Amino acid sequence: MKRLLRLSGNLLTSRFTSPVVIGFFLLLYIGVAFFTEEALITQMELVRQSAVLVALLSLLPLNIASRIVAEMLRYIERRRLFSGTAADNESELFDETIVLAVSPAITGLQERLDGLGYRTYQTERSLSAWRGVSIFPARVLFLSGVFCLFLGILVSLVTRTSYRGPVIEGVALPTPSGNGGVVEQIRLEKSTGSILSKQLSMEVAPARPGDARVSCGIYPPTRYQGSFVYPRFLGVALLVQFSAPDLQKGFEKHAILNIYPAGKEAAVEIPDSPYRLMISMAESGDGSDPYMTGRMNFTCKLLKGNEMLFAGNVPGGGEFVRDGFRLAFPDFRRMVITDFIRDYGVLFVWSAAILFGASFLFWLPVRLFFPLRQMLFIRHGTDMIRACSRTEGKEKMHGGVFNETLDMFDAGRVERKTNLG
């Protein structure tokens, strides 16, 4: 039982656990890609439906969490060693450990290290020296970011739900709960930012008394009633009225048409008839964007089977009459095909991005200008000293000081040297 627990602990804290798990899922993706073009979506569905794959994916955040705990414990133990209150397990905490059979006296060593810019602390049996700032906070921030990233991926795969619907001016927002506020206006405008050339906003009235008015845009995604709002495609909600000489009754339909930008076509089928309408948004004569101005004309083609009977332009709110055929668009409104995604994993992914940024901002100046360098000398008995060294930068400079410090001891011989880097 103890061996099993020890093996599990080693597995959770190993640096190789996460790369191996990631490699497995990469190989799984490559295998799935041989059978489908939607490899990523298929792999996500496989993970959702398999408890084994979910458990395997869970190893990623568990591994990082265990490494964070192990990193903290090593840091605390190292601090205890430097204060002289820890047991003698320093060999696991330093880059280099040397055992010297020398006189126990360390006369003048503290003054010399102080003169070299090191801060020192001496007890009856040990002398510690350090210089610079530890990158431990940056490392913990980085590992915490990796943990949030892996946890976000896991939460997204297991709990993510998605619903797609048309957001239409003057109609209630089609949220999964079915109680969204009325969309008062959809606006597409030129962007003042440096990335996007245009910005989209969907103004939504309060759904209930006391609720706030909401404006949903492209980025960052708005959160509405627990779901993230992602606009996908622009188009027009068009009331289509059609009649023909050989139709017993007219045809009327509220059509959701993905016909933006201008020139993009969408089909409207006339049921129980050979007719089909091909509708697109016509270019404006003055070069303006019809979706932005709201002044829309529509280019229409009437097909009977594969034969085109006629084509023409119909203004929004107007009609077209020819040879007994009548086509009218009495109502048209801006429309946005929108995804409503309930995905709490996104919050962890955003947190990971923030933690990565904070880690880098701390790590860079410390690593370049104030790297930590540490030395520890511990007396064992009456004729042996263990000398330990560790550095997080400027290795050559610190190594020279460490070796010169060893030379200050009385002439003795090195019994054992262990490089733990």
Image: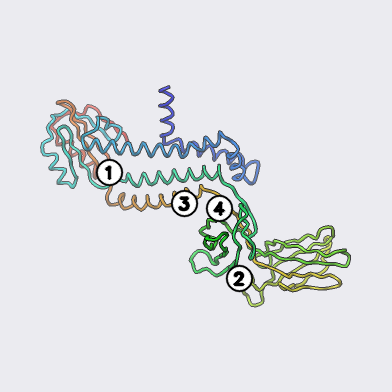
Q: Earlier in the sequence, mark 1 or mark 4?
A: 4
Q: Earlier in the sequence, mark 3 or mark 2?
A: 2
Residue under label 3, please give it. 350
Total labels drawn = 4
Task: For the C terminus, give its image quadrant.
Answer: top left
Q: Measure how far apart labels 1 and 3 are at the Cα level.
A: 35 Å
User: In the current view of this chain or complex, which residue is farthest to the left?
Assistant: 107
**In this view, the mark in front (1 or 4):** 4
The residue positioned 73% from the left and 62% from the top of the image is 254
Tell which circle, 1 or 3, labels the residue nearer the N-terminal end: 3
SS type, badge 3: helix
Tag 4–tag 2 contact (CB < 8 Å): no
* Residue beneath disc 1: 395
Q: Which mark is residue 262?
A: none
* Image quadrant where residue 284 sits: bottom right
Q: Could you tell me the amino acid type at mark 3?
A: Trp
Q: Which residue is mark 4?
A: 227
Q: Residue furthest bottom?
A: 286
